[in-house]
Image (cartoon, helix red, strand yellow):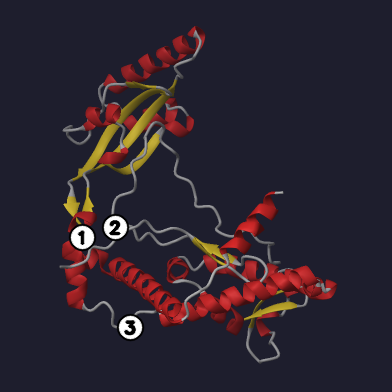
């Protein structure tokens, strides 16, 4: 019997540096199932993604501090790719840092090379912080030194556990991959999707009569425009829609659309405009631009993500097995009385 695997949504993973976090790249979407249902009450406008890293800006190549940077060399002879003050980041430094990132962060960098500058800025900030640490001998304080030793021990243990729990390079093979896909086929089902555009007229339930009358008049005007011959939904949307609630909603899986709106668009032909739908925040008028029928993603579509998921779960199982065997060979002995006294003392 083929063991099913849990198909999970990918989450952002931040790469930690010795002192401060140096990069937190957006994860590449590896979900095999549609996103969790969410209420589509107000359409959110499309926004440019926020920069994944906030770090001090590196002076531009035109400023005096970086003139001649392209020709600069580090003591190792490698090209300097960035500098702030007397702190350099070499190409080797950057390559080593990227190599230490997780597969999701590396995939994000390969898909959006512009993120590389964010990584470099964060590395420079980290170097500056480390300079401060050394200058002030902050790391030599007894409590800090003790924390650093504990962090070092934890990091060493984690790195070693990773080394003994990494699956073989050829795992899973094609037969194993096919069996897992077949056993989890339902997880790759994609629901029907709707491409929608919306005109929204804000009118909260608790609105006073003046606000309600104003919104109702605006809604009546919009409906008259929409029913006029040759009406242009997009133009009316731009002229009469209320702020962030109006606009192109893009492709939405059916389960993400709240029932009141879903019933209005179900079975409609493309290009159809719904009647106004009253929700708690106001009136919603939808135009159905297109639909996609429900389907199951094929193995080639999900291959890379599925391999990563299988390897992750195998690594987790190998880690647990290794730790269990280690504890079996060296059974721990706990002084329950001392532990109880310790807890009692901490409560006082």
Q: Earlier in the sequence, mark 2 or mark 3?
A: 2
Mark nearer the viewer, 2 or 3:
3
Mark 3 — residue?
168
Q: Are marks 1 and 2 in contact (CB under 8 Å)?
A: yes
Q: Earlier in the sequence, mark 1 or mark 3?
A: 3
Judge whether 259 appears above or below 335 on screen. Answer: above
Mark 2 — residue?
32
Mark 1 — residue?
184
Look at the numbered disc 1 and give the secondary structure of its residue.
loop
Look at the numbered disc 2 and give the secondary structure of its residue.
loop
The answer to whether 162 appears left or right of 174 in the picture is right
Q: Position of residue 316 (x, y in %)?
A: 38, 70
Q: Position of residue 89 (x, y in %)?
A: 66, 78
Residue that sits furthest to the top in the current view: 209
Instruction: Tell me the crowding category of disc 2: few under 14, some 14 to 19, or many 20 or more residues within 10 angstroms, Cα based.
Output: many
The residues tagged by marks 2 and 3 sit, at their Cα atoms, a distance apart of 24 Å
């Amino acid at each position: 019997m083929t063991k099913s695997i849990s198909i999970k949504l990918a989450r952002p993973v931040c790469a930690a540096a010795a002192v401060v976090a140096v990069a937190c790249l957006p994860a590449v979407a590896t979900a095999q199932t549609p996103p969790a249902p969410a209420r589509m009450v107000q359409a959110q406008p499309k926004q440019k993604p926020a920069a994944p890293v906030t770090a001090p800006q590196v002076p531009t190549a035109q400023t005096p501090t970086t003139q001649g940077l392209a020709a600069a060399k580090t003591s190792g002879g490698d090209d300097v790719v960035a500098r702030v003050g007397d702190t350099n980041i070499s190409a080797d430094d950057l390559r080593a840092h990227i190599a230490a990132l997780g597969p999701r962060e590396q995939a994000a960098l390969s898909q959006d090379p512009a993120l590389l500058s964010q990584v470099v800025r964060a590395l420079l900030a980290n170097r500056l912080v480390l300079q401060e640490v050394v200058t002030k001998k902050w790391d030599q304080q007894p409590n800090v030194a003790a924390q650093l030793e504990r962090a070092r021990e934890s990091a060493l243990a984690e790195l070693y556990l990773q080394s003994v729990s990494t699956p073989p390079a050829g795992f899973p093979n094609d037969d194993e991959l096919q069996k897992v896909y077949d056993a989890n086929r339902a997880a790759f089902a994609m629901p029907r999707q709707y491409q929608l555009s919306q005109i929204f007229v804000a009118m909260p339930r608790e609105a006073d009569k003046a606000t309600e009358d104003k919104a109702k008049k605006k809604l009546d005007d919009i409906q008259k425009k929409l029913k006029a011959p040759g009406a242009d939904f997009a133009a009316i949307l731009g002229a009469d829609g209320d702020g962030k609630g109006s606009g192109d909603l893009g492709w939405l899986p059916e389960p993400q659309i709240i029932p009141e709106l879903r019933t209005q668009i179900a079975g409609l032909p493309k290009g159809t405009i719904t009647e106004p739908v009253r929700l708690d925040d106001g009136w919603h008028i939808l135009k159905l631009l297109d639909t996609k029928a429900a389907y199951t993603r094929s193995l080639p579509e999900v291959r890379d993500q599925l391999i990563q998921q299988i390897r992750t779960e195998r690594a987790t199982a190998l880690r647990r097995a290794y730790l269990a065997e280690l504890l079996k060979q060296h059974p721990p002995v706990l002084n329950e009385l001392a532990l109880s006294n310790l807890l009692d003392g901490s409560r006082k």
